[in-house]
Amino acid sequence: MPAPKIVVVGAGPAGLTFARLLQQNGLHCTVYDAERNRNARNQGGTLDLHSEAGQRALKEAGLWDEFSKHARPEGECDKLVKFDGTVVWDENVLKDFARPSDGGKPEIDREKLREILLDSLESSVIQWDRRVKRIEADPRQQGKYAIHFVDGTRDTDIDLVVGADGAWSKVRPLITDTAPYYSGTTAVELWALNVSENHQWLSGYVGRGSCFMFDEGRAILAQRNGNDSIRVYACVRQPETWKDDCGIDWTDPRAARQALVSGYFDDCSEDLKRLVVETSNELVVRQMYMMPVGISWETVPGVTLLGDAAHLMTPFAGVGVNVAMADALVLARAIISRKDNFFAKALSNRQNIAGAIKEYEKFMFGFAKENAEKTYEGLQRGHFSKDGVEKRADKFKEHYTKLTGKVLSDDAFDHEARSLSTVVVD
Ligand SMILES: Cc1cc2nc3c(=O)[nH]c(=O)nc-3n(C[C@H](O)[C@H](O)[C@H](O)COP(=O)(O)OP(=O)(O)OC[C@H]3O[C@@H](n4cnc5c(N)ncnc54)[C@H](O)[C@@H]3O)c2cc1C
């Protein structure tokens, strides 16, 4: 029996990790992506990879050493600020603080992660500029699928279609009618480039990793990226139409920043307002969509979904890429464990693949639900509530005390306190 024909739609972290894992184990797949080439689009900000998800997938894919060369463990460093500018937590000054996470959650630029995965694949695997229009059960061959591209071409005779094509998946309709819905939050993404030269204040204020302000219905999230840049997300809880009817002219990024600050962050501290206004480079308005928490479906033989295509979440727990890479790992394992069956005749390819999908989806529904719940908590409360930063700081302080036996004073992180000896009371 020939090896099954496996096609992945989407060259994001999920699709690429899956393709690499198959390749490592002697199985071939083709990855179709809509982008014109690998450099066609800016790939966005920084991602932290968790030990039992993103990190585990890269280890099994034989890419751990490459990842370690580019990872930024110092990017885990958090600073938490109230809307009035009070700093309630700042790891930039706590030199003896280690994170509670097992093995750490080092950051990596999304672009770098993609490069590592792309460079690890044989050139025949990826086909760029292949935007999928729709997929259908192949009318001529039972149990097989046909993909139609927007340019009028098609690919047929496919045993397994893996939809890793993100939020607006074209594969998803084969499996479920459920579609993403607006989460109630819009994020204005603001970039500052060459910060060590052009934005020294911003660079110093944000610190080595992330700087967060959470408040009722609004948040500012600033993150250092690897290429001497900082991205700031100014988030507001507003209706879906806000982007178009709020009266801000997004085509004038400088005036838009000012209008955003005066309309939604005017009572914030001067430092927080400056955080938004000083980011003088690109501005992107992102309406945040999500799939229902705990989504599941009846397994469809020959088709499945990975990552955002399966369970799109808002970024308010920072887990999306980890769940996506864990999906890729578990589906790849399920296929690889049946590799010998593909070449024996005991079961058909269709039966083998159906078994693999069932095994994978059982894991995926549970793991995605767990992480979607965490994310929903961040969306509804953590990131968008009055006491959000204090609650998070309390958790960190508790851990700090457990770790060091020291207690931090209430005003530990005021502007004068800049060394550990001045912030510890016990
Ligand atoms: C602002 C923001 C910040 C985030 N921050 C974090 C974070 O800190 N930590 C974290 O873990 N996650 C974060 N996420 C989420 C994370 O980026 C996603 O969960 C992750 O990228 C999902 O990967 P994926 O491979 O499933 O999909 P994607 O990365 O969306 O990749 C999908 C791919 O499919 C291709 N494609 C789409 N349609 C088609 C088509 N019709 N035909 C062919 N190809 C197609 C696209 O070109 C793309 O390459 C963030 C997301 C956003 C929006």
Image (spheres, rainbow, N blue to C red):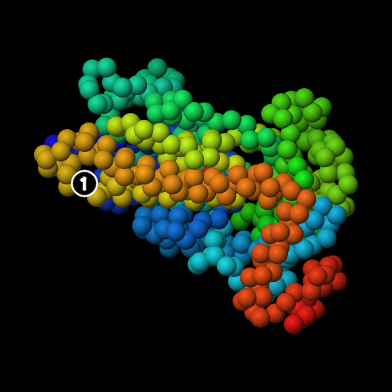
The C terminus sits in image quarter: bottom right
Choose between 197 and 147: the one closer to the eye: 147
Residue situated in front as seen by the camera: 410 or 349: 410
Q: Quadrant of residue 11?
A: top left
Q: Amino acid at mark 1?
A: Lys
- Label 1 residue SS: helix
The answer to whether 19 appears left or right of 397 in the picture is left
The residue lying toward the viewer, choosing from 339 and 237, is: 237
Image spot of residue 338 (x, y percent): 22, 46
Judge from the rendering whether residue 140 lies leftward or rightward of residue 154; answer left or right.
left
Let me know if residue 195 appears in the view: no
> Residue at position x 36%, y 55% from top?
61
Packing grade of label 1 (10 A; few <14, some 14-19, many >=20) is: some
* Residue found farthest to the left: 345
Q: Position of residue 285 (x, y in %)?
A: 69, 35
In the picture, which quadrant includes the N terminus? top left
Q: Give the tally of numbered discs.
A: 1
Position of residue 16 measured from the top left corner of the image (x, y, whole percent): 41, 44
Q: Is residue 148 left or right of residue 97?
A: left
Indicate the quadrant where residue 413 lies. bottom right
Residue placed most toward the observer, 1 or 253: 1
The reply to whether residue 297 is in sight is yes
Compared with 260, 86 (above or below) is below
Residue 333 left/right relative to 204:
left
- Give coordinates of residue 231: x percent, y percent: 68, 48
* Residue 136 vertical placement versus 380 (above, below): above
Residue at the spot 43% in from the left edge and 28% down from the top edge: 176
Question: Which residue is rendered at x = 62% and y = 76% of the image?
Answer: 402
For ligand 1, tell me if the residue under mark 1 lies within 8 Å: no
Residue at (33% x, 31% y) in the render: 300
Q: Residue at label 1? A: 339
